Amino acid sequence: MVVTDSGSVGGLRKDQVAAFLGIPYAASPIGALRFAAPEAHAGWTTVLDASHPGPSVPQAPRMRSTRISVLGNSPRDGNEDGCLNLNVWTPADALTDGRLRPVLVFIHGGGFSGGAGGWPWYHGSNLCALGDIVVVTINYRLGALGYLYLPEIGADNLGPQDQGAALRWIRNNISAFGGDPHTVTVSGQSAGAYSTAALAADPATSGLFQRLLLQSPPLALAPQDPADAVEMAAEYTRLLGVDTASDLGSALRALPVEQLLIAFSTLAVQHVGPVGDWRPPLMPVLGGAGMPCTWQQAMTNGAFDSKDFMAGSNGTENTALWQMSNNTAVQKFTREDALCLLPGLAPPTDSYAEACNVEAIYNQYSARLPGRTPGQVFTAITGDWTYRDAIVAIAGHRTTLGHHSYIYQFLRAPRPDPDDLGSTHCAELPFVTGNFEASIDAPMLGSIDDGDRELSRALAGAVVQFVKTGSPNGPGLVNWPSYGSASAPLMLTFDSSRISVAEAY
């Protein structure tokens, strides 16, 4: 049993790991608290049963069905009541020996529309046991519940506000679980990595952690412009039939959550972007709570300079998006098709894009990927633009200031791979967590062998070492050079056949 600020929690122990699951870090966002900033939980007087995960944030069925085609199955456990919860895995000895362990906080992805910290994909018991660290995963509001922008009723980047509330709960309570509140790494994958970068950029939350680990952050997606967010909110309320309500907040809070989810699904379908653009209709709004600036401004302002930094992406990120959207057009692309679409997808931070010389980019990638089809070259380019270029820019900036940065690329592809996913978006997750059983039905994983398990031990070992020391290097671990430690920028590539140092293009 552990005593927190809100009350006592009773978990469960398996081998050398104690787990405390589904702990509320804020009040349930129901009734008047729906579409409102997170508030402190009132607490409980009896011992809270923390032996099983709490409910996930409600999310549209469409979000679940698209995940299955790449990631495998996920629980059906959404409920507004109790959804703002977190999970803690700690070495059992940490509860009694008085020695505080480093803490890893993981923020799940899901396009700001899906996912849950309590789902088996993200369980932290393996990392906890491997590295003698404390692992925490969190929920935060998603879709319209978390990103509808109606500041006049209190709906202002509620997902990011939830994440900040969770970090403050961790700062105040994690020592009771044997965690060191002053040695905290915040990590995230996809939308979770995007959120992690924002938490580092926000002065209100930046001081709550010391290390930053970004897995496939889609930083090429600029935060939503407030004017666009207002238009999306107006369209959403029209879909719900409450746009003319005299008290919009009360009208939205009175609707069944299922109706809110259906309307969000409709909004998402109506705003599907062109091939290569997966921007969701609702996402963090620039200048709103928890999103003070773009990542470029954060980098220039020094937001990433004071933190240890590790980040990476996968070799063929966007194949998952084609599969989840059942989009076969890319597979049939000609070179001309790719060159026609690329200018509209290029991020403004890309040097080639600034010169509108996408043909030069295409030729570079085509030469580096011999035998690939134009669709595969297009996929590689857009994947790097979305998930990789910002990482390299941040690492380069840090190098000029004398700071170390550790960059990776994950290249392992599933076996078999009938959908030609390659090392797609999310593919690294089971190798970081070691939760292969949770992803056993995932097309992105396929079958695993001893080489895959060795790969997982190497990647997870590096992550744990980074959490503990700020560097992935240590005794018995693969040598991981800092990005700027040689004449050419360097990264570490992870594949089943080998782990090697490569030039970070």
Image (cartoon, rainbow, N blue to C red):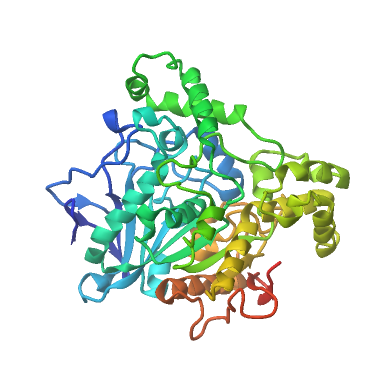
Q: Is residue 251 visible?
A: yes
Comparing 42 with 199, the one in front is 199
Q: Position of residue 381 (x, y in %)?
A: 74, 54
Examine the image and state in which quarter residue 365 appears.
bottom right
Residue under the image location 65 percent in, 48 percent down: 320
Image coordinates of residue 457 in percent, x first then y, are 52, 73
Quadrant the C terminus occupies: bottom right
Q: Is residue 435 left or right of residue 418?
A: left
| Residue 131 quadrant | bottom left
Who's the residue at 24% across and 66% down the image?
175
Note whether 393 is above or below 198 in the view shown: below
Task: Check the image and report above or below for 155 versus 484.
Answer: above
Against 289, is 134 above or below? below
Residue 58 in picture, x, y percent from top left = 41, 36
Quadrant location of residue 82?
A: top left
What percent of the width, then of the height, locates residue 169? 28, 54
Q: Where does the N terminus fall, quadrant-wise?
A: bottom left
- Taking the image as shown, residue 69 lies to the left or right of residue 176, namely right
Q: Nearer the viewer, residue 278 or 486?
A: 486
In the visual, does 30 lie left or right of 434? left
From the viewer's perspective, is 98 left or right of 496?
A: left
Q: How many marks?
A: 0
Residue 498 visible in the shown view = no
Q: Nearer the viewer, residue 113 or 65?
A: 113
Q: Residue at x 33, y 55 (%)?
A: 167
Q: Is residue 310 above or below residue 478?
A: above
Tell which residue pokes out farthest to the left in this image.
Answer: 45
Name the outermost residue toward the bottom: 475
